[in-house]
Amino acid sequence: MPSVRVVSLVPSLTEAVAVTAPGTLVGATDWCTHPADLDAVRVGGTKNPDVPAIVALAPDLVIANEEENRAPDIAALRAAGVDVLVTEVRGLDQAFRELERVLDACGAERRPGWLVAAEAAWRNLGAPSAGATRHAGRLRAAVPIWRRPWMVLGRDTFAGDLLARLGVDNAYAGHAERYPRVPVEELRAAGLDLVVLPDEPYRFTRDDGPEAFPETLPAALVSGRHLTWYGPSLAEAPEVLGAALRAVYR
């Protein structure tokens, strides 16, 4: 039996703990899709977890995130006597620090091989490759994350930081909101070089998203897991995201 019983309410942290310390997780959300063979009780969604079910699992620790999970649910768990570790991730460097903190709290190896590899992958990035295939400068992009209504990445986001490291600057990085609603008409007229469309949380596809923008505006469909998850996927994210960004300028 594992020495620490953990419930994770954050899909990317679920994967991080599961691959580092198998058997530690006793509960996870319905959205925790990695690893595929995860054996843990499902406790609802990230925004609507089943608090009584979590308490019934008698966890030593619940892992949450200040953005993905709701404050009332975290407060309810704490009121029930459950220890909750709340992470904050607004950029890549902070993600690495928080991953170490989470793994340590779970009694797992603080710096497993996948985390060391992820740090190296991002540290050893060459010159931004996406923009180099088009012009000497950087690419200016909007990054929608929802449709009906259209919402985009705004200021101070983890995904925006990853894209910036790959040579793509978020056109709404200076917005007052972190995830502003922006009419598609404004996006079309924003003078963008590119629109980046992840497949989560909204599942943008080639038939649902790019057609809303001018045919002259390149649209890069990217893996949401590699753009927004902070966990083992970070080790391959530079290659996966870079390839998707380069593909639109071949």
Image (spheres, rainbow, N blue to C red):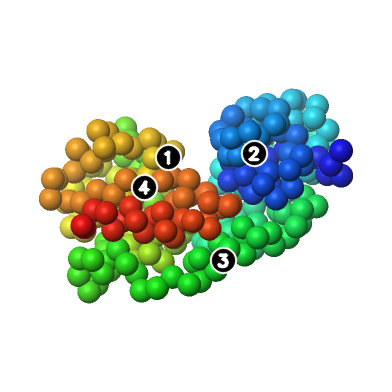
Q: Between marks 3 and 1, how big is the CA–CA gap?
A: 24 Å
Q: Residues within 10 Å of mark 2 (few under 14, many from 20)?
A: many
Type of amino acid at the residue the image marks with label 4? Val
| Residue 167 position within the rendered picture, expressed as x and y whole percent measured from the top left | 34, 66
Question: Which residue carries the number 2 mark?
Answer: 9
SS class of the residue under badge 4?
strand
Q: Earlier in the sequence, mark 4 or mark 2?
A: 2
Type of amino acid at the residue the image marks with label 3? Glu
Q: Quadrant of the N terminus?
A: top right
Q: Between marks 2 and 1, how big is the CA–CA gap?
A: 17 Å
Q: Between marks 2 and 3, how big is the CA–CA gap?
A: 24 Å
Type of amino acid at the residue the image marks with label 1? Glu
Q: Earlier in the sequence, mark 2 or mark 3?
A: 2
The answer to whether the residues at label 3 and label 4 have Cβ atoms under 8 Å apart is no
Residue 200 is tagged as 1
Type of amino acid at the residue the image marks with label 2? Leu
248 over 207 or under it: above or below: below
Residue at (68%, 40%) from the top-left corner?
8
Q: Quadrant of the C terminus?
A: bottom left
Question: Which residue carries the number 3 mark?
Answer: 119
Q: Nearer the viewer, mark 4 or mark 2?
A: 4
The answer to whether the residues at label 2 and label 3 have Cβ atoms under 8 Å apart is no
The answer to whether the residues at label 3 and label 1 have Cβ atoms under 8 Å apart is no
Question: Which residue carries the number 4 mark?
Answer: 222
Q: Nearer the viewer, mark 2 or mark 3?
A: 3
